[in-house]
Amino acid sequence: MRLIQCEHENHLRVAVVESPERIRLVNADEGVYGLARRAIAEGRPLSAVVGEALSDVRLDYAELIQGQRLLPPLTHPDPSHCLISGTGLTHLGSADARSAMHAKLDAGEHELTDSMRMFKLGVDGGKPRDGEPGTQPEWFYKGDGGIVVAPETDLPVPAFAEDAGEEPELVGLYVIGDDGQPWRVGHAIGNEFSDHVTERHNYLWLAHSKLRACSFGPELLVGDLPDNLEGTSRIVRDGETLWEKPFLTGEANMAHSLANLEHHHFKYPGFRQPGNVHVHYFGTATLSFADGIRTQDGDRFEIELPTFGRPLRNTLRFAGRHDAVAVRALR
């Protein structure tokens, strides 16, 4: 089952994707969030709760897209109760890159960079087989729900940014139950969107490079996730493809298991606050920045993973200037 959220008659609505052309509305007052909370409270699968709430109203999918009425597929009524985070150095990359990578990993410990050392920890211990937690990954914070932009809308680039680069990723979407139990609602396509020039200048600026907008959706996949996911990431400029590359994700292409990444996020009590929403990006191995691409105002990112239905598309909009932020003292 694949779900979307959209605006219909000035209200947030949930819909089931019936085909590439048509969606069917669900009777739900609080969106996917409310349906998930109901499923948790009743101890039933989300798919069953959705199935019982289906309406007879069907809408044209293309018209929603053209009218920019799509919304992120999971939102919290209060964006401050939605945490956006992610993990890096998680993906193995293509076969050629992997071969070169292992050659580097065979070097002596003293020859490894901090990033390669972290990656090696994941390769060696990111998929434990005994049910115990494995190696913890790199982790970063992006912001709260206020930084999320809807599919088909603009990704804002602050004037102080040195780069505006896509990161095509798998995203996990979660709701915390009233007892503090994390529940996975499903997965979606994500564009984590980072400032790679800032990060490359000094890896200790990784935190700064991640404090940007992001997008995910348009569709939320409920149910089992394939181990191998093959997609395409592209940049369109002035109506023509500027850059395009396939990418791989899913556990078969990762150094860490998803369960291990989830454990090391939710092991912190602060991330298990009842009622909160979590959007967690699982990393990538494919970046246009690595191929020397510098994005411009008006470039459109398109990220496709056929398992998730329609692609995630967003257009870049650069801010004109940046004024220094002055803090005032309360005297």
Image: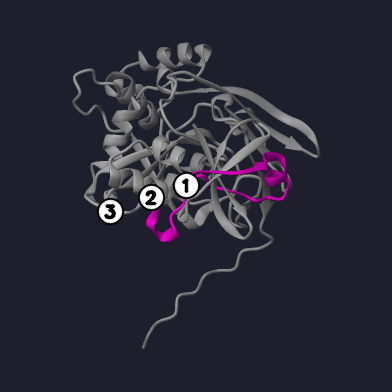
Write the start and end of the magenta stretch as one range. 54-83
Indicate the amino acid at tag 1. Leu
**Residue beneath label 2, please?**
277
| Dots 2, 1 in contact, CB < 8 A | yes
Mark 1 neighbour density, 10 Å: few (under 14) some (14–19) many (20 or more): many
**Residue beneath label 1, please?**
74
Would you say residue 74 sits in the magenta stretch? Answer: yes
Q: Residue at x 44, y 59 (%)?
A: 77
Residue 320's label in the rendered image is none
Q: Closest to the observer: 302 or 92?
A: 302
Q: Secondary structure at mark 1?
A: loop
Q: At which x and y percent is residue 64? A: 68, 46
Mark 2–mark 3 Cα distance, whole angstroms, equals: 9 Å
Mark 3–mark 1 Cα distance, whole angstroms, equals: 16 Å
Would you say residue 100 sits in the magenta stretch? Answer: no
Q: At which x and y percent is residue 52? A: 44, 40
**Vertical side of 189 occupied by 39: above or below:** below
Indicate the amino acid at tag 3. Pro
Mark 2 neighbour density, 10 Å: few (under 14) some (14–19) many (20 or more): many
- Any part of residue 317 in sight: yes
| N-terminal-most mark, 2 or 1 | 1
**Residue beneath label 3, please?**
274
Q: Secondary structure at mark 2?
A: strand
Q: How many marks?
A: 3
Indicate the amino acid at tag 2. Val
Q: Secondary structure at mark 3?
A: loop
The single residue placed furthest to the front in the displayed view is 56
